Image (spheres, rainbow, N blue to C red):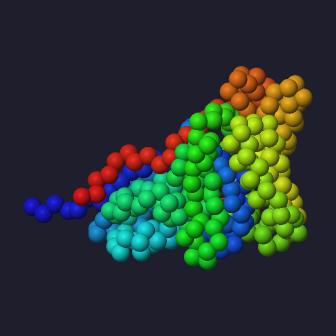
Amino acid sequence: MKVGLLMRATARAFTNIALIKYWGKRDETLFLPMNSSLSLTLDKFYTTTSVEFCSCLSSDVFVINNQLGDVKEVNKITRFLDKVRKLSGKSLKAVVNTTNNVPTAAGFASSASGYAALAAAATKAIGMNLNPDSLSRLARQGSGSACRSIHGGLVEWQKGEKEDGTDSFAKPIEEGQDWDISIFSVQLTSEPKAVSSRDGMKRTVETSPFYSGWLAGVEKDLLLAKEAIKTRDFALLGNIVEGNALKMHATTLGADPPFMYWSSATMDVIHEVQTLRTMGIQAFFTIDAGPNVKVLCLPKDEQIVYDVLGKLAKVEDIYLCHQGPGITYISNSNR
Ligand code: ADP
Ligand code: DP6
């Protein structure tokens, strides 16, 4: 009996939350960003993805959270797998089975963990052993923020200068790896957002008069944030992170048509974080593309921050996160 070649692998990637945001592309096909960014990979939210390539398939199959993906989602996966096929020189179709241990498309960065896990599982399954820089470059081409989820802890995505994107990938910030920062993921809704990050940043780049203001300040924010990490200056880091998020969201108000990711519940959390600071607690917020809020504090203040935010009527759930790991391979049966 002839035994078929097994080309299957499973990988897990954790979500990351941007402390200095990636907001805007200079090349939409290659996912090249206008600015560099900085993130923290979390330990609570993750995606597990299995990929199996097989000569028995005539097209790719995509199953997400136990349901067949719709045509639009399958096309996205196929476009990404085409890049993997091109890199490997193989043309086999695949079954992708993925589960998000995080709400999908709700501002909790499912696209980051999703494409990081897919890049890792697909390359392993097809028989490639990419180094972390190459894996990050590949994940970037599924979703920009995914290039940061290849690594654990504090991570910088250097935007790069080259037109072909070979210098645009993420690296861990070594000085930050043992800094224990607490992040509360404050869930206000787990519903998918009306404007995706992809569409939102595109509209902002193309139409918002405030976008030039964003670009004028973001690299300085990044430098100061890295300095704060180096010197373990939490108040400086928090202030920079909060200001950077506010500037990103301000650009959306000037877009045409304008949009905003915040809800009234988002404002309630912002106000509560500001109140905490008047009480002498160093807590700072950041918000990605969606109404949910992430709140940074030091481990010693976790209880008070949890108690205060937990009392808010519109808070559905609060998850306490710390630094999480980079890509983890769960199984590999390529042989
Ligand atoms: P989020 O805040 O969750 O990252 P986005 O709108 O940026 O929201 O991205 C959501 C999109 O990411 C989904 O519509 C889907 O296309 C993709 N995505 C999410 N999870 C996965 C996954 N596990 N595997 C592949 N793609 C995924
Ligand atoms: C606000 O990485 O989801 O979360 O590259 O188009 O897939 P695409 O966008 P995505 O955008 C993330 C935007 C952000 C900021 C960030 O994570 O840096």
Q: Position of residue 128 (x, y in %)?
A: 36, 63
Q: Residue at x 13, y 63 (%)?
A: 2
Query: 140 or 7: nearer the eye?
Result: 140
- Most distant residue in the left direction: 1
Locate residue 263 relative to residue 81 in the image: left or right: right
Locate residue 310 relative to residue 320 in the image: left or right: right
Question: Is residue 245 in view?
Answer: no
Q: In this rendering, is residue 170 above or below 301?
A: below
Q: Residue at x 65, y 64 (%)?
A: 159
- Most distant residue in the front direction: 231
Locate residue 145 relative to residue 240 in the image: left or right: left
Query: 279 or 95: nearer the eye?
Result: 279
- Most distant residue in the bottom direction: 163
Q: Quadrant of the C terminus?
A: bottom left
Quarter of the image where one finds residue 280 = top right
Q: Position of residue 143 (x, y in %)?
A: 59, 62
Q: Position of residue 62 (x, y in %)?
A: 45, 60
Query: 333 or 297: nearer the eye?
Result: 297
Locate residue 302 relative to residue 115 in the image: left or right: right
Question: Is residue 331 in view?
Answer: yes
Q: Position of residue 238 (x, y in %)?
A: 78, 40
Q: Quadrant of the N terminus?
A: bottom left
Quarter of the image where one finds residue 93 = bottom left
Q: In this rendering, is residue 143 above or below 280?
A: below
Q: Residue at x 60, y 48 (%)?
A: 173
Q: In this rendering, is residue 96 above or below 230?
A: below
Q: Residue at x 57, y 50 (%)?
A: 172
Query: 26 or 133: nearer the eye?
Result: 133
Q: In this rendering, is residue 31 above or below 301?
A: below
